[in-house]
Image (cartoon, grey):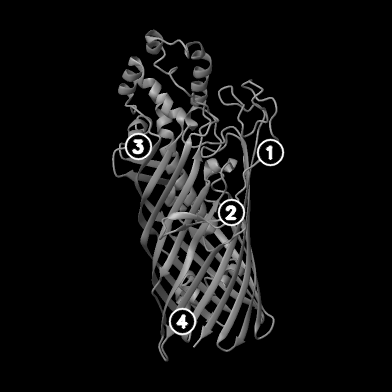
Amino acid sequence: MNNIRLSPLVTAIILTGCSSAAFAQLGTNLSVDVRSLALGNAVTADPPGISAVHFNPAALTKIEGLQTDVQGIIANFDIQRQFSVPAGYNVFGYSDDPMVCNDGPEISADICTDFKDTINGDVEYASLYVPILKKMVDLGEGMPLAAPTAGIAYNPPGSKATFATAMYAPLIAGFGAENGNVGNYMGQQVALERITYLSPTMAYQVNDELSIGGGIGMSYQAIGLKTDLRFPNELIGMLRMIDEVVCTPFKENSDIITDILLLGMCNTEEGMNPFSRFGQLQLSLEQSLSPSFNLGVLWEPREDFGFGMVYQSASKMRLKGKYHIDNSKAPQELIKGLMSSPTGQILAAILGFPTAVPASESGLISMDFEYPQHFQAGIKYKILPDLQVNFDIGWTDYSAWDKFRFEFDRQISALKIAKLLSADINDTSLALPLKFTSPWNYGIGLEYSATDRLKLRMGYEPRTSAIPADKRNTMIPINGAQLFGMGVGYRFDADTDLDLSIGFLRSKDNIPANSSSLSNQTGVNNILLNPYAGLNVKTDTKITILGLNYRTRW
């Protein structure tokens, strides 16, 4: 019963951590540079113009005079979420979940007689967190996310140093759905963004073959979440059984004896149900200045071969924000019932239960969050005079997300209860174990010079998931993924270039029933976050990116 009070707040925290982790992998490098997208991001040895600020600062030495880059990138998210019922589905003997059961109110059985074949909870539109408004904004059905970028670089005449800065989005993603969507229990609206608004960078040409570079990135980081809550748990199933079976004879004629013996649990106007909506939560966290640095090396011993290497530092932040929870009537009634009984009050005092569950709760929340460090190295090689191949390998330290710790500006009664269950919890903080891994990935790109003016490009980047198999869920609509890119580059004159690219990322995931502790695990210990307990879950994510870059030398 103490867990009922704990559930909404803890679930909110878990969902926030998962959403950030999810999109960090899903959206990385999809909205930085058009040419890189077409080459599968295999550009460490062949960085594109001013975007070298991000991919390899050393390559800025290839710029002469004053150069500006302006890019427009749009992305469309198509995320399908499906749920189905396996054989033997039930929660503490109940299977009449209206989400998956066709039975109407005329059928009073606790066991469903007619299950739906497949239940769809697809994402319906893109969402974006707006810093000035400090809230998420729906972009409308069919509307894509947009990420305009710009940069400027200058190489003084006769100088071996080049200076540059760029504004770009290393990470931007968000989605949402209308009220009533069955996917809303793991995020009705989710938004994550990291925007680098200033990146002073310098590159130096050591000699004709070697260049080095480094820069500082000043970024804005934000996480936004709105989600419905439900807890199909064995413990709540037992509370339903008590309400419907044990308490039925005493609902209208209870007395002091029954109140004492039954702890007041039968004095409720609405009983607990594992399939009911328990409320809704809204949450936002942000930091206006999140610094990091990039270091790069570029070695080109021959005209047809080059080697590049870049290190992008971790960025440690202290995200701060607010949360708001709307609690439904059932958990309020449960605690109210306990407080109506002398024995219930004694039990609540011994265990530290709250004396009431409010209709809504609001407060301040903060967390230490680390945007992970990244290392990448690659080569470029002209296998033919007009055909160049790029190959990169990279590593991102997602293992930094072993555990997320959330802190509050006051003592939280829910945490006072939860600390009885875990050593990771005290009165004002909660630590969430995630156990992410740090995989290596590769990318390959081809560039063909059809004429002196026209270049054709294509690339491929398979993305290995950093998310453990037992932590997958619908808010992380990706496990492994494949990114395909194609593009053209056209030089109008000696000082003007135009790049057009299209990218397509695809990921399918299958989460069998009872296989993920952050999605569909059954049992008594799944109360924190398993809104689809006992169900089979599938996701199919498609992201289409279109970008245009206009580059001019002055």
Three-letter amino acid code of the residue under disc 2: Tyr
Visible residue check, residue 41: no
Which of pointers 4 and 3 indicates the residue nearer the eye?
Answer: 3
Find residue 473 and report its horizontal and vertical position in percent: 55, 43
Pointer 2: what residue? Answer: 125
Q: Position of residue 184 (x, y in %)?
A: 55, 43
| Amino acid carrying mark 3 in the image | Ile
Q: Kindly state the secondary structure of the residue where label 2 is placed.
A: loop
Q: Which residue is mark 3?
A: 425
Q: Nearer the viewer, residue 473 or 214?
A: 473
Q: Looking at the picture, how far across and down is residue 222, in whole percent?
A: 42, 56
Q: Which residue is mark 1?
A: 118
Determine whether 104 is above or below 178 in the image: above
SS under mark 1: loop
Q: Residue at x 45, y 76 (%)?
A: 58
**Mark 2 neighbour density, 10 Å: few (under 14) some (14–19) many (20 or more):** many
> Reading the chain from its start, which is encountered first: label 4 or label 1?
4
CA gap, disc 1 and disc 3: 38 Å
In the image, farthest residue toward the left: 410
Q: Decide: few, some or many residues near mark 1? Use Cα within 10 Å; few <14, some 14-19, many ≥20.
A: few
Residue furthest top as drawn: 257
* Marks 4 & 1, CB-CB < 8 Å contact: no
For the N terminus, which image quadrant?
top left
318 displayed left or right of 266: left
- Measured as percent of width and height from the top left, residue 104 is found at 66, 27
